[in-house]
Image (tube, rainbow, N blue to C red):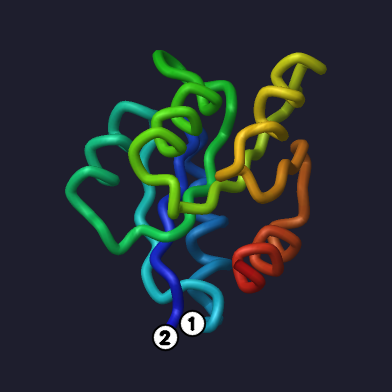
Amino acid sequence: MGKAALVVDDDVTVRKVLCEILTIDSNVVEKCEECENAKEAISILKNNPSIEVVVTDEKMPGMSGLELIEFIQSNFPEISVILVSGYLSEQDKIRATNNPVVKKIFLKPFAVSEIADVVREL
């Protein structure tokens, strides 16, 4: 059975494409939810214990992707996270890399198929 994923990005096109690619092959994810910000993601995570993978943007209005990752690490350390970003400072890259829930970092533009490959291997 495939995994359940949550895609968090303030760009609706990115969210839709990622969920579409991840659900085409049920060996990647069986279910993909999406939301536009970290606060909404936290609500979904609290109410949906089946989420195993989160793909999140770093730069979003309100709470950043790194803050979301730190929340996940503190509250749901069994969830794997893939971070995507248009730009990461060296400090933010180190912060993300040192967080044990972060399995991979992709800089935009990225190949969606590469993200699917990482999720498939988790």
Q: Amino acid at mark 2?
A: Met
Pick whichever, 115 or 53, lies toward us: 53
Residue at position x 68%, y 63% in the image: 118
98 relative to 92, above or below = below
Rendering coords of residue 87 (x, y %): 75, 23
4 relative to 90, above or below = below
Quadrant in which the N terminus appears = bottom left
Q: Amino acid at mark 1?
A: Ser
Please give left or right for residue 61 compared with residue 55 in the image.
left
Find disc 2 in the rendering and name its residue. 1
Quarter-of-image position of residue 93: top right
Please give left or right for residue 24 compared with residue 108 in the image.
left
Q: Are marks 1 and 2 in contact (CB under 8 Å)?
A: yes
Quadrant in which the C terminus appears = bottom right
The secondary structure type at the circle numbered 1 is loop
Find disc 1 in the rendering and name its residue. 26
Q: Which mark is residue 7?
A: none
Pick whichever, 21 or 44, lies toward us: 44
Residue at position x 72%, y 28% in the image: 86
Rendering coords of residue 63 (x, y %): 42, 18
Please give left or right for residue 18 compared with residue 10 in the image.
right
52 relative to 89, above or below = below
118 relative to 84, above or below = below
Residue at position x 44%, y 46% in the image: 77
Rendering coords of residue 53 (x, y %): 48, 56
